[in-house]
Each structure stands twice: as C-alpha cells, then as structure tokens.
Image (cartoon, grey):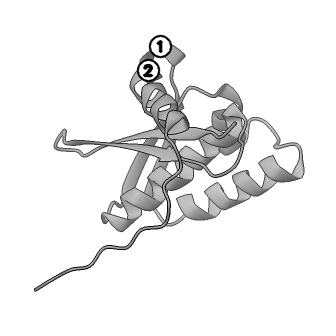
Amino acid sequence: MRSGAGIIVETPQGDKFQYAIKFNFEASNNEAEYEALIAGGKLTLAAGAKYLKAHSDSQLVVSQIRGDYEAKGSKMTKYLSYVQILMKRFDEFAIEQIPRSKNEEADQLARLASSLMPLKSRSITFLS
C-alpha cells in the first residue's frame, strides 16, 4: 500500500497553502512525518522563507529533531540527518509537537494523497 503526506503552509499574514503528496513507496507513520517535514521545508525555502515553525503530531520525530531521542535504524538516522542539514538553511527553525486532534487537516490531506491513483507521465505544452 502506498503512503502520502499532508502539508499545510501558513504565512505570517495568515495565507494558507495545502498540499497532498503521494509517495511512490511504502512509509511508516514516522517516515511519512519526516517526508512531510522535508517537503514542507523545501517548499518554504523555495518561497523565500527565512523562518520556519513546524508542527508534528509525532513525538518520536519531534524528539529526534530536538535531540531528546536518538534515531535508531539506518532509515531514521538518514531522515534525521537530512532534516538537520535542511533546517540549517533557515535563519530560525523550531518544531513543536501538537496533539493528533490539532493535526486533523494535515491527516485528511495525507489520507487523500494515499487514496489517489498514480498518474501516468504527462507533458504540458505552453503556447504563446
């Protein structure tokens, strides 16, 4: 079964952007949390953000990023290392654990992404 992630980016002005990302691989809940954090970090950097405050309902992921827990296993260690490098690109980064009930919107996006059928390759032609 394929997995997905939901990402909600909110600007300081209150504008909200929602993303549903389908993975072409199976991912555990914690791996999906890391994938969402990586994708959200890249999106916000591409938009020119200098500061990022991330929210996650995964105690394990938040604690690993904060340095409270050690990442175990090569996959989780690689995820943590990648996130640490990515987060250094921000002037300021913070991550906060939130209750699952406060993450329902992102969870709905993740479920939507997981249920989508894979898209075949497509091309877009711009005409002037």
Crowding at dot 2, Cα within 10 Å, few <14 / some 14-19 / many 20+, comes out as few
Where residue 94 sits: x, y (%)?
49, 43
- Asked whether disc 2 touches disc 1, contact meaning CB atoms under 8 Å apart, the reply is yes
Badge 2 marks a residue whose secondary structure is helix
Task: Decide: is 29 above or below 123.
Answer: above
32 left or right, relative to 78? left
Would you name the residue on which mark 2 appears? 104
- Residue type at tag 2: Glu
Residue occupying the point 56% across, 62% down: 86
Residue occupying the point 25% across, 46% down: 11
For this orientation, the residue located farthest to the bottom is 128
- Residue type at tag 1: Ser
Q: Which of the 4 image quarters holds residue 45?
A: bottom left
Where residue 107 sits: x, y (%)?
48, 27
If the image is split into quadrants, where does the N terminus sit? top right
Would you name the residue on which mark 1 appears? 101
82 left or right, relative to 21? right
